Image (cartoon, rainbow, N blue to C red):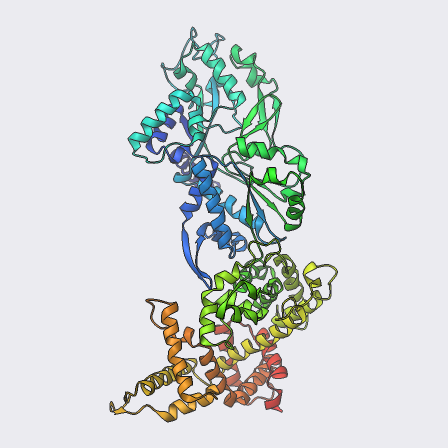
Amino acid sequence: MIAPVLEELAVISEAVERRFADERRVLSFGEYLALFASDPVRYSRFAGQYLRDMLDHFGRDLVDRPSGQVTRFRLFDLSFLEDREGQRRALAGHEQVQAELYRVLENFVREGRANRVILLHGPNGSAKSTIAHALMRGLEWYSTLDEGALYRFHWVFPRRSAGRGVIGFRGEEQVTGAGTSYAHLSDEETDARLFVETRDHPLFLIPERERAELLDRVIATAGVQDPPTDFIRRGGLSHKNRQIFDALLASYGGALTEVLRHVRVERYFISRRYRVGAVTLGPEIGVDAHERQITSDRSLAALPASLQSLSLFEAFGDLVDATGGLLEFSDLLKRPLDAFKYLQITAETGEVQLETQNLQTNCVMLASGNELHLSAFREHHEFESFRGRLELVRVPYLLSYLDEQRIYDAQVAPQVERHVAPHATEIAAMFAVLTRMRKPDPERYSGQLQEAVEGLTAVEKLDLYATGAVPKRLAVEAQQVLRANVGELLHETDGSVDYEGAMGASPREMRGVLLDAAQDVHYAGLSPFSVLSELERLCTRRAEYAWLGVDPKPGGYHDHQLFRRVLKDRLLDLLEDEFRVATGLVDEASYDELFDRYLTQVSGWLSGEKMRHAITGWFEDPDERLMGEVELLLGVTADTKVWREALLGRIAAWAIDHPGRPLDRRAAFDDLIHRLREGVFRERRPAVGRACRDLVILVRDSGSGLDDARQEAAQRFLERLCHDVGYVPETAADAAHALVQQRYRDVLG
């Protein structure tokens, strides 16, 4: 048993050793210089450039939104994480925030330094921490790839030879060839190593003038268009490294190659856990960098005399740990102002002042703050001096319930031990977004758009933002205008402190609602009906939540009682649709087919053309009987000619809104197909009601009282609901029982 395990350990050891060599984890300065010359841009990036390139590495997608196409950066999907955390911590929506972050990073690259603090501001629970987390996870992953390789250096001093000084210093016995690096010496051959905590760039070891000339030559040879940034051209060693460098250079009489023999270049990886290039700190008080004198120990006693006489100080703290990556100031504005005033100078100059040195910083500083604290900060007399050092990026609550639902599906549903019934998280998401809606100001618009916006209700706005669905009560032209201006409506309040998405139910509050609803003993799982019950309880706690204290406004805005009624009706409509389809009484595709035939006949009727019969092949007049029956099902009461001309007008409108794309009849005529479905369904309501009742009996009473035919039909009905919709028998029975009680009692008696 032991032998196979030891063999396995040997295989693992060989794999680790191979990977260590492949990743070029330890290099001499000369080896690093050759690596740098192979790709000077990759190995000379500062933190802002590194973050920008990391976002580019993961790529981006164009996403269709009701307001138009937007760019989504794939990093924020966290799809590179194979564990469940990737799905749980992925960022839902917020494409505008992503674009703003990328814009800021691009500006950092152009300016050659991350010279501002990025302040993510928004209401509590609006995903500010999620954004920072995604960036850090991306940095961790990117740093493990060849294109994301990062290097730092340390000092190495070889073992003394027979008590006669330090190997490599002039006048002493040498066991290595001239110019040989000490970087690859083993521990047995090494007396001392000095760790460089500030992660200075290895090229900083070359004096600035010669470095600039070297950079120009290497970049010209590589054919790189962009010049090197000021970070790599003019950056310098930290105070401790400068002391060591100068002492060694003096000991070697100015021989730089001898000094560089003591340099060991190491690859490092960004890590949140070990606080390497990815650090989050809370609202502590004080500067986030410090220094301390290096104490004397055996290793320091082994240093050459020229170094032992130095008072060496090492820097430490969050700014130091975050070097090369991202430093997140969580809830920065909760700190007293004096505690972060140093960020003004640090952001502008790239340095922070310590007792014995000015420490050069190289990290992107990302802060977060809620709107309450930002509003108070704006009133402070020093806000204007800070404003020039801040990049304000607004992170509102989501305004699409489809995005909001993704949060609950990823973060809450996996933690619910019971089955999550269809529409449970959807109802919670709709309610949350409804509480965030603001009544639009019609005075900002003109013409038909003003008329359309004037009567826009909160529920209509909910659908408009999520799916682009416009109110069917509007005329076709008004629908087109509203659909074309969703983006303008969405950004109406961008310039306001009290913007849309600044107030409402937060995902954290809705998380509590869903978890409480999952414990409702009246339902078999997390039911949408138990969610509605919990929402009712939530709305009684007016003193706890500011959004509950806002007075209702015309159009149903901030009317939480109305929201619950509307959502209950919408839920029952959704269930009816699902259960009607699952009965199999009518093939769902037949609605589309019938409407297609109707539309073809209407087109021929308006153009005066004869139509080819599908079976006989003869040309005949358009089928008046078919058109009349369909229009009866649609409930058409308008003049026939006007109605039919309006139908073709919709086709023209589709072509204008979607140039170059074939007609999508389901999208263009979704409301009419739905009305057609409803018309057919009216004739079959009793049959659907009986099917729901039989399903409840089958699940809850084991089919007691059902004959074989009804039991078999109920079983097929149940199987379709479970397979096609996502129910389990118990939650399907809960939904069927609700339909029987609230929609089918009139037809079942």
Classify 84 as above or below 597.
above
Q: Give the residue displayed 55% in from the left and 72% down from the top.
A: 728
129 vs 338, left or right, is left
* Residue 749 visible in the snapshot: yes
734 vs 610, left or right, is right
> Which residue extends farthest top?
171
174 vs 529, left or right, is left
Foreground residue among 398 and 167: 398
Q: In the image, residue 636 lies at what x, y percent?
A: 47, 87
230 vs 368, left or right, is left
Q: In the image, residue 211 lies at what x, y percent?
A: 39, 23
> Which residue extends farthest left?
618
Foreground residue among 284 and 472: 472
Q: In the image, residue 705 lies at what x, y percent?
A: 60, 89
Classify 251 as above or below 661.
above
Classify 454 as above or below 55.
below
* Residue 520 visible in the snapshot: no
Q: In the image, residue 118 lies at what x, y percent?
A: 54, 42
> Which residue extends farthest right?
543
Q: Give the residue displayed 61% in from the left and 68% down from the top.
A: 526
Foreground residue among 417 and 378: 378
Foreground residue among 338 and 644: 644
Say which quarter of the image contains residue 42: top left
Q: Give the residue displayed 61% in from the left and 58% down from the top.
A: 507
Pick the quarter of the image with the C terminus. Answer: bottom right
Count of numbered labels shown in the rendering: 0
